[in-house]
Image: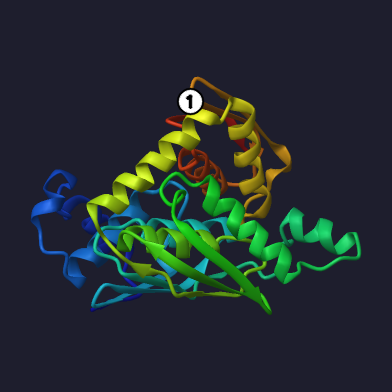
Amino acid sequence: MKLSNIPLLGVLAALFFVTPLAAADSIDWNDSVIASRLWAQYAASASINPISMDVEVNDGDVILRGTLDNRSEVVLAETLAEKTKGVKSVTNHLSVEDKTKKESPLKDAVNHAGEEITDAYLATAVKTKLLANKHVTGFTIGVDADDQVVTLTGTVNSDKAKKMSDSIAHSVSGVKSVDNRLSVKSSENDENERKTRLNALTSMVDETWVETKINAQYAVTDGLNPLNINVNVKDETAFLKGSVENRAEKELACAIAKDTVGVSEVYAGALKVQ
């Protein structure tokens, strides 16, 4: 099922007439429902202008095409799709309309230092984000990188965890593509064991560790400039302040912080859009 070049009124109609979230567990997640959900999320987001986007859904596999205003929006659009119920995979062909936009500060810094983003760097960056994310930490996931292609191996206990791992790897600046070879083995024992490991990790970390992990994720995330973001964690709440270039960047920063081990809430009232 394909929805493409949909007019603004169509997007807004999807927002207002889509099935309420409270009934999400009782509906049939066919392609038309998934597409409506995606358009509703994009229309509701203050960070994404979906007018020049195409969304194609085939048996739960989503393909995103078109142009957005900046790299932050491209990454955020994929992140929202990955988290949509019923979605099996996301292929992101979105591009940035302004081709003259600068590269991320991370890329600039590396290039100015006369170094390149190596495969070893990419593997470490992906591992860093996987370890810090509370939805996938506790799984044994192998990460390898070759010619900027990241391969994930190991076992997770749900399709959601597999999709989340794929999305995390894709979000790392410098990664060209991801070969997701994770297998799904779902059992109550596996989930209980993962929760035990997660609880043990959460009990051991302190606020400085959490702040460091959030900053480390910001530093390697495509579409995010970490230089002007200050992170402070207290009582499992992450306080973000400083400035970002656009709303999509702010939303991305909040999402990463909220998914980090040791964080229950995020307050970003002091994080201003320039």
The residue nearer to you, when weighing 40 against 202, is 202
The residue nearer to you, when weighing 78 against 272, is 78
**In this picture, residue 108 sits left or right of residue 20:** right
Q: How is the image coloured?
A: rainbow
**Percent from the top left, x then y, of residue 267?**
49, 28
Quarter occupied by residue 156: bottom left
**In this picture, residue 44 sits left or right of residue 187:** right
**Percent from the top left, x then y, of residue 3?**
28, 74
Tell me: residue 32, above or below residue 129: below
User: Which residue is denoted by mark 1 in the rendering?
Assistant: 236
**In this picture, residue 183 sits left or right of residue 126:** left
Res. 116 visible in picture:
yes
State the residue at coordinates (41%, 48%). Answer: 135
Which quadrant, please, contains the N terminus?
Answer: bottom left
**Percent from the top left, x then y, of residue 170?**
54, 65
State the residue at coordinates (61%, 41%). Answer: 213
